[in-house]
Image (cartoon, rainbow, N blue to C red):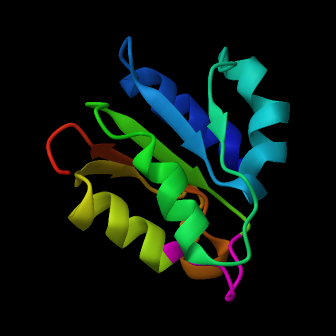
Amino acid sequence: MRWRLTGHQQKKQMQPGDVLFVYHKARHAVKFYGPREDRRDYRVATSHDEIIPYLRELDGLRGNKRVYFFYTQWTRKQPFPGIKHYLGNVIGKEISHIPDPHGGVGLREAAAYRYVLSGRK
């Protein structure tokens, strides 16, 4: 349900050419609720045990003006702070975010962050 509400807000903000990059643990929510929000065009991150492979995957998104990073089902051992820092401070800039519709934070949060990845190399 959280993806559905977050996805609904995201759909209202999406523009042609926007990229939706889904953290691998959120893939089931997007697969289930995505079609209900007419979201079939998204990229799912590969599951990795370490952060460097995630960062190389994110490097492939460089050049996009609007990239949404959606995640849910976070766990302590996952590299989220590093991923978010990399997107917003190394290869791009955070523009906005769609918070968890139920007020979840930390490990209970389901949210989408929007970045501009077109300028930094």
Q: Relative to residue 101, is residue 13 drawn left or right?
A: left
Image location (x, y in percent) of residue 17: 38, 16
Q: How many marks?
A: 0
Is 52 above or below relative to 17? below
Q: Residue furthest bottom?
A: 76
Instruction: State which quadrant residue 86 falls in.
Output: bottom left
Q: Residue at x 67, y 60 (%)?
A: 72
Residue 12's spot in the image, x, y percent?
43, 22
* Left or right of residue 1, residue 39 in this image: left
**Residue farthest left in this picture:** 119
Boundaries of the magenta span: 74-80
Which residue is painted at 36% across and 51% down in the image? Answer: 97
Query: Residue 112, can we see it?
Result: no
For the point 62% across and 29% down, the residue is 42
Position in image of residue 59 (x %, y %): 41, 49
Q: Quadrant of the N terminus?
A: top right
Asked where in the image residue 6 lies, by quadrant, the reply is top right
- Residue name at image x 44 percent, y 77 percent: 82
- Relative image position of residue 91 (x, y in whole percent): 26, 55
Is 79 within the magenta?
yes
Q: Is residue 43 left or right of residue 83?
A: right
Tell me, yes or no, if residue 31 can be seen here.
yes
- Main SS of the magenta part reads loop
Relative to 13, say whether 28 is above or below: below
